[in-house]
Image (spheres, rainbow, N blue to C red):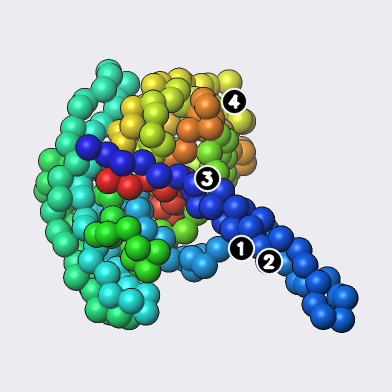
Amino acid sequence: MVRYTGLFALLLSTACGAQGGGTGTDPNGAPEATEAVGKTEQKAQFADNTVVNLVDPLSATLSVTADINPVDVNVFYVSDKTTNSGHQVGTVTLVDTLSLAANQTKVHNVNLQNAAFNGGYGALFLDSIGSSPDDVFQTYVEYGGSMFSVGGSVFTGGSYRIPYRSGTIRTVLVLTNQSDFDFDLTIENVGGTQFKTITLPVLSTYKFDTLANGWFLSGTSSIQITTTNGGVIALSGYTDRLLNRVRITPVKAAPFFQL
């Protein structure tokens, strides 16, 4: 059973907490300072329930660091895929548990031979054991000669643009649905007329390759990604130019969900 919680719930509880105190006055009649709307105790780059997707990484390593409290982190591989031919139902499989002392860092070497990464791409899900606000950790993924932070939130759902430069031969993207509902996803070339729409089920990953789909990327422009009903995605990928591959770093989208 998958239990979903959203960033919306966090913001709602924060807003309620701010409203609960009200605005008063001190003994001298001056207004008391009110808490800033939207303030949260969670550190910006520490976040539970992290989706990471990878494409053609050759090798990949996760580094997970606890905050000032100990935490146990489960690592799941997610094998559900969506292709141009249809939906390939997969599984969410627990492959590792990292028990971290306060401030400790541990490493998980991604097993790219696992069926979850068939086709050279797939997704992982990291989830702390328990529900305490202190069950937070920071995650970095290292591959392709670089290290990327994948904690926190960047996208809020609905619309995304990925730029490409003049001379780009192809752009490859992997997109994982991390909403708690299925949605339609449309990919279109802002610098051209090509577009494609698919339905992406919950926790399913789709690989899009402009070259394989016959797209020609001319000049400097971008690829527009839109989702229905504000659906949110985790995203990574790369662009190929002549003898040069540039990685699109893994991006964590909001809201979070929890197994």
Give the residue at mark 2. Answer: 35
Nearer-N-terminus badge (4/1): 1
Q: Check whether the beta carbons of the residues at disc 2 and disc 1 lie within 8 A of each other.
A: yes
Q: Where is residue 242 in the image (x, y as percent from the top left)?
A: 44, 48
Q: Which of 182 and 186 is in front in this view?
A: 182
Q: How crowded is mark 3: few (under 14 residues within 10 Å), some or many (20 or more)?
A: few
> What kind of residue is marked 4?
Gly
**Residue type (three-letter) at the residue carrying disc 1:** Lys
Q: Is residue 68 above or below residue 142?
A: below
> How far apart in space, not on screen, are marks 4 and 3 (Cα)?
35 Å
Q: Mark 1 points at which residue?
A: 39
As rendered, which of 155 and 143 lies closer to the eye? Answer: 155
CB under 8 Å between discs 3 and 2: no
Q: What's the residue at 51%, 25% (across, down)?
A: 228
User: CB of mark 4 within 8 Å of CB of mark 3?
Assistant: no
Given residues 237 and 100, the one toward you in this image is 100
Marks 4 and 1 in Cβ contact (< 8 Å):
no
Which type of secondary structure does the marked residue at label 1 adopt?
A: loop
Query: In this figure, which residue is indicated by the disc labeled 3?
Result: 8
Residue 234: percent from the left, percent from the top? 41, 44
For disc 4, the marked residue is 192
Q: What element carries label 4?
A: loop
Of the residues under marks 1 and 3, which one precedes in the sequence? 3
* Alpha carbons under labels 4 and 2: distance apart: 48 Å
Q: Distance between the residues labelled 1 and 3?
A: 13 Å
Which mark's residue is nearer the viewer, 4 or 3?
Answer: 3
> Does 85 sit above or below residue 230?
above
Q: Earlier in the sequence, mark 3 or mark 2?
A: 3
Residue type highlighted by circle 2: Glu
